[in-house]
Amino acid sequence: WDDADVPNRCLSAATACLYGLCEAAVLAAGYAPAIGFLHRGKPLSFVYDIADIFKFETVVPAAFAVAARVERGKGEGPL
């Protein structure tokens, strides 16, 4: 983690949050998180499928926006 650059740390953290939200939604809806369509063979395959629908419109732009703020010295806290 400490060796990664700021944009990759932001992407990793934001994607982990998205996966958590998607897993909660999948479980709340009563679906099995392991039964994926695009992703297969992982315990959270369906979660990854659902997350991919939203990732590039939400998480990726937000992560790069935060990384840019941090790089300019306007971010909050250590990264």
Image: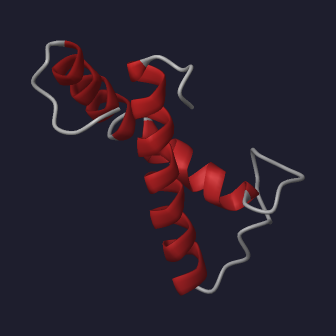
Q: Is residue 13 above or below residue 31?
A: above
- For the view shown, which residue lies furthest in the right direction? 41
Q: Is residue 17 above or below residue 38?
A: below
Q: Is residue 2 above or below residue 43?
A: above
71 horizontally vs 33: left or right: left
Rendering coords of residue 4 (x, y %):
53, 20
Rendering coords of residue 74 (x, y %):
9, 24
Point 22% across, 17% down: residue:
68
The front one of 64 and 26 is: 64
- Quadrant (top left/top right/bottom left/bottom right) for the C terminus: top left
11 horizontally vs 31: left or right: left
The front one of 10 and 37 is: 10
Rendering coords of residue 55 (x, y %):
44, 40
Q: Residue 60 falls in which quadrant of the image?
A: top left
Number of numbered markers: 0
Q: Residue 32 falls in which quadrant of the image?
A: bottom right
- For the view shown, which residue lies furthest in the left direction? 74
Point 22% across, 39% down: residue:
77
Rendering coords of residue 49 (x, y %):
63, 50
- Quadrant (top left/top right/bottom left/bottom right) for the N terminus: top right
Point 51% across, 63% down: residue:
20
26 horizontally vs 35: left or right: left
The front one of 75 and 68 is: 75
| Colouring of the image | secondary structure
Point 34% across, 35% down: residue:
57
58 horizontally vs 40: left or right: left
The front one of 39 and 17 is: 17
